[in-house]
Amino acid sequence: MDQSIKATALLMLTADQRKKLAALARVKARGSSLEPDDLLQEARQRWLKSDMPAEGNDATFDFLWGAVNSIASNNWRRQATVRRMEGQRIVAASAGSPDPVETAPDSGPSPEDTYLREQIYGLCEDDEVRTLLLHQDDGAPRAEILSELGWNVTKYETVKKRMKKWGARLFQEGKI
Amino acid sequence: MMMPDRESSLREELLDEITENLRLLKGAELDAYLLELGLDPDDLLASFDDVFQDPEIAAKRRMFEAARRRLQASADAPSALIFSLDAARKREIFATVKKRADATGDMTIAARNRRIESEDDLDSLLEAWVRLGVIDESGNLKE
């Protein structure tokens, strides 16, 4: 596809769409080995090289949004795997075995979850959110929480939604 | 050995919530949310443009933004049409209004005696007359 058409399509992105993409890149780069500009640059390259027709700013935006997510996700997964497998990788390389990074499963729950729950608990004065955080910190699965608290699924999701709103504050404070 | 399926970590859930909000919000609400995240909207725009603009695109975007601003201005300003008239037509309108003002005395002395030293002066006077209802956007006298 003509690259100038694809490049021109980038001009049609609105200010809101450009802000959203730049913000997404910063959110996705947080805590990773990538810089936000790397994510945007790679997404731009994918757009220019893709066969996706330039059909309007919404389609262009959707493509770039998906590209930033995909690049960040791939990087994050690989980075986490490399961290876990680094020691085995050295052994495998000397023994001529397959690279463990390529065959390793995804990791389990993040150890920082407890820290984040503590942070939200300290900020939040919503009793239901605090109750949920305490139960989650005990490792209780959803079914058990519902049973113990007498909540239905809708109530559980509503409280969880209120809890997740604190993510913006934690992001702003550099805690996630 | 494969690990069992698991739910997303809290960190992932919090970041997903942020990205979902980013995707849904618009305009002033988006800007407010960005500030809540500690992200400056203008800084985001600048960083996006730094990455996405090569010189050709930058020039095109400036033209595009200028056109968009002109369109917005024309929608906001009732007198925008008056500016698009040619200089001779503007002077003709000026003369017509002044002649009527001299005849009827229904305009302030300051307006009647206004010195016109440039086309900008003429534009601002014509705009004022449109806003005062002396003439319409095409420069025709109103009754």
Image: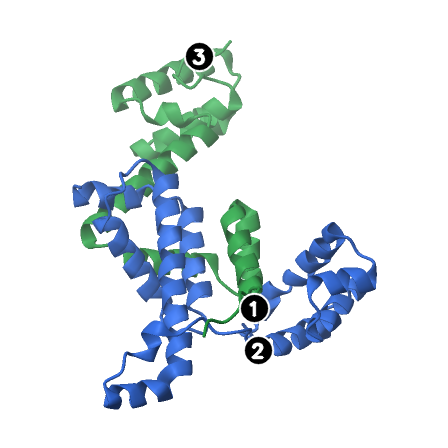
Which residue is under mark 3?
B141
| Residue B141 in picture, x, y percent from top left | 44, 12
Q: Which mark is residue B9?
A: 1
Dot 2: element: loop
Looking at the image, which is closer to me, B90 or B34?
B34
Q: Are marks 1 and 2 in contact (CB under 8 Å)?
A: yes
B64 over A137 or under it: above or below: above
First reached walking from the N terminus: tag 1 or tag 3: 1
Structural distance between the alpha carbons of marks 3 and 2 = 74 Å
| Residue A132 in picture, x, y percent from top left | 74, 66
Residue A37 visible somewhere in the drawing: yes
A3 over A126 or under it: above or below: above
Looking at the image, which is closer to me, A39 or A18?
A39
Q: Is residue A75 left or right of residue A143?
A: left
Q: Residue at x 21, y 50 (%)?
A: A49
Tell me the kind of residue under disc 3.
Answer: Leu
Dot 3: element: loop
Tell me the kind of residue under disc 1.
Answer: Ser
Q: Residues within 10 Å of mark 1 (few under 14, many from 20)?
A: some
Chain A painted colour? blue
Mark 1 or mark 3, whichever is nearer to me: 1
| Residue A100 in picture, x, y percent from top left | 34, 79
Q: Which mark is residue A132?
A: none
Q: Say whether mark 2 and mark 3 are on the same chain.
A: no
